[in-house]
């Protein structure tokens, strides 16, 4: 094979692309991974704020869903990855007791129901049994079946199992807070997979949240990338794919922005949804429903990374905490990085906050800076002295709609009739988990499917 000829080209050096390339290389396939940034895992990088390392990603690992994808990959490839397991979440309300409530791990419907109703600002009384009934039904769904229920509305499903009005309201509120979405969005379009995936992974002990040292980029993706190269795979860094070359409905390779062409009968896309149109022209009709879904309905995600000169958050907060607003929706998330990942700080508090807003709600603000200012107002209200303590803060908005697969909308097809050899390996396909786990699962499973059709045709 010449230098510019490969069995498979994987476009995109994020979690999905790296997992896809790694699994292919491990199985002896001549693979080229293209990362437009100078190193893989750009979206999982730390943000440096006043000299501290703010890491914004906490991957979940679905421990009891066949062991999880990134964990499996790391084991199979024998990569020196190390991580610690985060404590279960904490929660507080906007107007109630400012002390965080620390959630225990709850493996059964009964323990989950007991703990979750204890968070309710209104007395629940006997209705705890109604909540338990829904949780029991949701927990009983086998993981494989749950993944397939990405297109079944959780609201419709609750009707089907005869959930009481209170139980529906309650489950919707809990999931809205776990996801940082409004209760309306959850009720209108969240899937059973989205709802119970979140509950089971984050409160039900089926998945664990972990912190890589120093972050998911340097502690997970870069070590896997090194292993890809050790095993004979090639990574081209700092090069952007300009177009996927397609002749007569068959992939022929890619062209880089500098005009260089690389040949392959199989191209796997590990790029975020919103980047596909730039490199696949014309867009195959099979991609259109999923690509247009979510733009208006799903939330925009805003984050602030803040270093405080004096401590303002409670010293005993050592885990992620969501804050329930007075109407039951999610107000904001706090991630106290200084206590969860002590290596990020010089001793000061370093906090990542996240706020999700609907497109409509976000349009009420003049611009993103006004949204970040609003987030600091909320922090000041919850923790007086916040603003005065700020040494530096950085705001960010993330474009990748990674929560899309948890909603009932159309998913990206993995392979398509209209273009042979073109595979979609990103996290907007049918789900394989949540978050980075979902992206790496998507990459891994796509690689497995490619391996079963080695000539790349579907
Ligand atoms: C605010 C926010 C917080 C999150 N927090 C968490 C969390 O705490 N835990 C968790 O598990 N998950 C979290 N996620 C989700 C997680 O980040 C994503 O699921 C995951 O990173 C998606 O990986 P990916 O490889 O599919 O996409 P990306 O990370 O978007 O990777 C795609 C890559 O393709 C590259 N690319 C695009 N076009 C081209 C081209 N033409 N040529 C070459 N390269 C190209 C891009 O540079 C990019 O590196 C969060 C996401 C957001 C937005």
Image (cartoon, grey):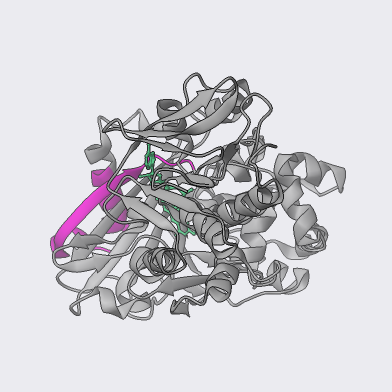
Task: Give x and y (percent) for residue 293.
Answer: 56, 29
Q: Position of residue 138 (x, y in %)?
A: 78, 58
Residue 131 seen in render: no
Q: Residue at x 53, y 60 (%)?
A: 25
Is residue 233 part of the magenta span, yes or no? no
Range of residues picked out in magenta: 372-401
**Does residue 340 show up?**
yes
Residue 162, relative to residue 334: is it above or below? above
Instruction: Classify 168 as above or below 41.
Output: above
Q: Name the foreground residue: 38 vs 145.
A: 38
Q: Residue at x 20, y 65 (%)?
A: 307
Quadrant of the rendered image containing residue 24: bottom right
Locate the C terminus and report the quarter of the image it occupies.
Answer: top right
**x 66%, y 57%: residue:** 197
Q: Position of residue 123 (x, y in %)?
A: 66, 62
User: For the image shown, how many numbered marks are present on the structure?
Assistant: 0
Q: Quadrant of residue 286?
A: top right
Is 321 left or right of 42, judged from the image as shown?
right
Q: Residue 178 versus residue 278: which sits nearer the camera?
A: 278
Identify the residue at horizontal 40%, vertical 61% (top origin): 57
Asked whether residue 395 is drawn in magenta, I would say: yes
Q: Is residue 365 left or right of residue 104?
A: left
């Amino acid at each position: 094979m010449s230098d510019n000829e490969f069995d498979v080209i994987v476009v995109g050096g994020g979690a999905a692309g790296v997992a896809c390339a790694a699994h292919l290389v491990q199985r002896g396939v001549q693979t080229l991974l293209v990362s437009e940034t100078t190193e893989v895992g750009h979206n999982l990088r730390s943000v440096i704020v006043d000299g501290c390392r703010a890491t914004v990603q906490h991957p979940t690992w679905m421990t009891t869903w066949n062991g999880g994808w990134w964990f499996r990959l790391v084991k199979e490839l024998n990569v020196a990855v190390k991580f610690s397991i985060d404590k279960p979440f904490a929660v507080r309300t906007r107007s109630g007791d400012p002390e965080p409530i620390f959630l225990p791990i709850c493996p059964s419907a009964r323990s989950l129901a007991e703990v979750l109703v204890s968070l309710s600002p209104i007395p629940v009384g006997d209705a705890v049994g109604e909540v338990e009934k829904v949780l029991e039904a949701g927990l009983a769904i086998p993981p494989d079946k749950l993944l397939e229920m990405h297109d079944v509305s959780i609201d419709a499903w609750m009707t089907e199992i005869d959930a009481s009005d209170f139980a529906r309201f309650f489950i919707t509120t809990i999931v809205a807070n776990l996801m940082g979405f409004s209760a309306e969005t959850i009720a209108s379009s969240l899937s059973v997979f989205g709802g119970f995936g979140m509950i089971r992974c984050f409160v039900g002990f089926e998945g664990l949240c972990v912190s890589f040292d120093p972050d998911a980029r340097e502690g997970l993706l870069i070590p896997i990338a090194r292993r890809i190269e050790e095993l004979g795979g090639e990574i081209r860094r700092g090069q952007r794919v300009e177009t996927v070359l397609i002749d007569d409905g068959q992939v022929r390779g890619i062209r880089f922005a500098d005009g260089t062409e690389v040949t392959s009968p199989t191209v796997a896309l590990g790029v975020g949804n919103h980047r596909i149109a730039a490199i696949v022209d014309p867009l195959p009709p099979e991609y259109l429903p999923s690509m247009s879904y979510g733009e208006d309905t799903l939330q925009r995600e805003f984050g602030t990374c803040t270093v405080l000169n004096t401590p303002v958050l409670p010293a005993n907060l050592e885990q992620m905490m969501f804050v329930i607003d007075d109407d039951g929706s999610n107000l904001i998330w706090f991630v106290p990085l200084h206590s969860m990942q002590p290596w990020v700080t010089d001793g000061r508090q370093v906090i990542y906050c996240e706020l999700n807003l609907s497109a409509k709600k976000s349009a009420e603000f003049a611009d993103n800076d006004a949204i970040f200012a609003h987030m600091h107002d909320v922090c000041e209200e919850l923790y007086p002295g916040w603003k005065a303590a700020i040494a530096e803060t950085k705001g960010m908005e993330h474009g990748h709609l990674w929560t899309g697969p948890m909603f009932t909308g159309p998913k990206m097809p993995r392979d398509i009739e209209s273009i042979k050899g073109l595979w979609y390996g990103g996290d907007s396909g049918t789900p394989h988990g949540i978050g980075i786990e979902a992206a790496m699962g998507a990459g891994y499973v796509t690689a497995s499917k490619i391996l079963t059709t080695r000539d790349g045709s579907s």
